[in-house]
Image (cartoon, grey):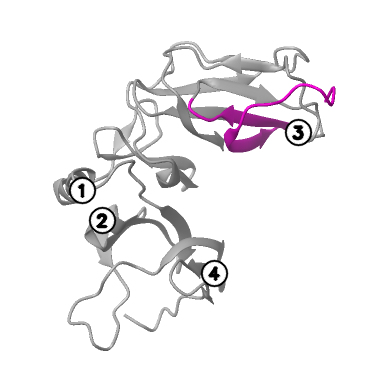
Amino acid sequence: DDHVSILPPFSSVVVLYNVWLFSVQNSNKVFFSSVGNPSVINAANYFSAQTSPTPIIEMAILGEEAYFFKASNGVEIWDYTGQLTAPFAESPGRTYARGCTSQNSVVQLDNSLFWVGDDYTVYRTGTVPQRVSTSLIEDRLTACSEMIAPHNFPAFTFSLEGHVYYILNLPPVGETYAYDCQTQQWFRWGTQLPQQEEPGIFYCQCGTGQGNQIYMGSSVDGNVYSPDPRSH
């Protein structure tokens, strides 16, 4: 905000208590804005998620806490302090000993955060990370890891007829899987064209809405779709 200092490139942004947080690309540093104004960032207003020097690859807000997902060596949980010079502080003893392999896999749903861990297991937040993936899902994630790096597993969520889903796309193997939070089961999803014998990867890789107003964006044709519960 001094119009002189050059800020580094940011990789993600979240807001908590009207303060915007910006994680620095390939770093464990986090800059924070002035209260109520995301465009005002003092070059000296930053802190480091310092449990380990591993870079932050994604940030997320759950409840009144900020989660810093690192590529390895854990997920740090920070609380809001209200202090102007140090508005956030690490919550002692709550760091997860499990990292995150894909920035786009982190999704908030069902009062939790879901992500693909650095061991290619799907977790959800709790007192400790709770495994929700099955051996099949982990095998497919591991197969993806052997094909391409860095790993990108786009995920999103929506709710339909009382069921909340975590939709996980696996582009390297052309497959999509959906976790139903209510039944705690995984299902194979996909987009099947007329000439295809088996469904391929689900074209939609982002979504929003609930009830009768659900919208999903296609990564293939750029269209926006709504699910039809009568179709299977």
Between disc 2 and disc 1, whose residue precedes? 1
| Residue kind at label 2, given as amino acid type | Pro
Image point (39%, 84%), residue name: 230
According to the picture, the residue beneath numbered tag 2 turns out to be 172
Q: Circle 1 sits in a helix, a strand or a loop, which is it?
A: loop
Image point (75%, 12%), residue name: 85
According to the picture, the residue beneath numbered tag 3 turns out to be 18
Between disc 2 and disc 4, whose residue precedes? 2
Q: Circle 3 sits in a helix, a strand or a loop, which is it?
A: loop
Other-residue count near label 2 (Cα within 10 Å), few / some / many at <14 / 14–19 / ≥20: some
Q: Residue furthest bottom?
A: 194
Marks 2/4: CA–CA distance: 27 Å
Q: Does the CB distance between marks 2 and 4 fall below 8 Å?
A: no
| Residue kind at label 3, given as amino acid type | Asn
Residue 189 x %, y %: 29, 67
Residue 20 x %, y %: 70, 32
Residue 39 x %, y %: 79, 35
Which residue is more in the foreground, 36 or 6? 6
| Residue kind at label 4, given as amino acid type | Ile
Pair 2/3: label in front? 2
Q: Does the CB distance between marks 3 and 1 fall below 8 Å?
A: no
Marks 4/3: CA–CA distance: 28 Å
